Structure formats: structure tokens, C-alpha cells
Image (cartoon, rainbow, N blue to C red):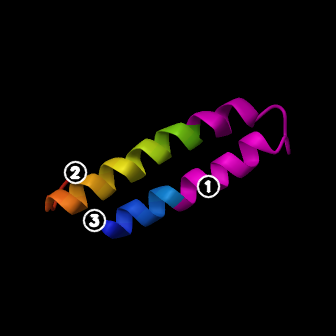
Amino acid sequence: MLHYAIVFFIISIIAGVLGFSGISAATAGIAKLFFIVFLVLAVLAILAGVAGLHAL
């Protein structure tokens, strides 16, 4: 479960850098959306791992 949390966290960081840095104005909205979605998934995966759940 921690593996998924790390993967989602890395994806959210990449999306955040692309979305909030203004690299491309056309994809900024999509990158911000991905940042939020994958950050939420990372938090859920961490909570599921702490709770001892093996499937999300």
C-alpha cells in the first residue's frame, strides 16, 4: 500500500510543478486537476496502509 502512496505522491508533485509553474498555459488546468486527484489518492493510500487494508 505504501508503494501506491509513493507513486501517487510523485505523480501529484509532477502535476503540481507543471500546473503551478506556468510552463504551459494550455495544460495548467489539467495539471492542477491531476495534482488534486493524485494527492487525494496518495492520502487515501497512506490511510489505508496505516489502517491495515490490503486493497483500496
Q: Are marks 3 and 1 in contact (CB under 8 Å)?
A: no
Numbered tag placed on residue 56 in the rendering: 2
Return the disc, 3 or 1, that comes first in the chain's sequence.
Answer: 3
Helix, strand or loop for disc 1: helix
| Residue type marked 1 | Ile
Give the image location of residue 52, x and y in percent: 14, 62
Q: Image height check: is 48 above or below 31?
A: below
- Report the label total: 3
Q: Are marks 2 and 3 in contact (CB under 8 Å)?
A: yes
Question: In 3D space, how far apart are the residues under numbered discs 3 and 1 (Cα atoms)?
Answer: 19 Å
Task: Please tell me which residue is depicted at 58% across the width and 43% down the height of the picture.
Answer: 35
Please rate how many residues cluster around mark 1, counting C-alpha atoms within 10 Å: few if below 14, some from 14 to 19, many from 20: some
Question: In 3D space, how far apart are the residues under numbered discs 2 and 1 (Cα atoms)?
Answer: 21 Å
* The magenta stretch spans residue 23: yes
Give the image location of residue 37, x and y in percent: 48, 39
| Residue type marked 3 | Met
For disc 3, the marked residue is: 1
Image check: 10 left or right of 48?
right
Q: Provide the residue span drawn in magenta.
A: 10-33
Quadrant location, the N terminus: bottom left
Q: Image height check: is 17 above or below 29?
A: below
Task: Please tell me which residue is depicted at 55% across the width and 61% down the height of the picture.
Answer: 10
Task: Please tell me which residue is depicted at 39% across the width and 60% down the height of the picture.
Answer: 5
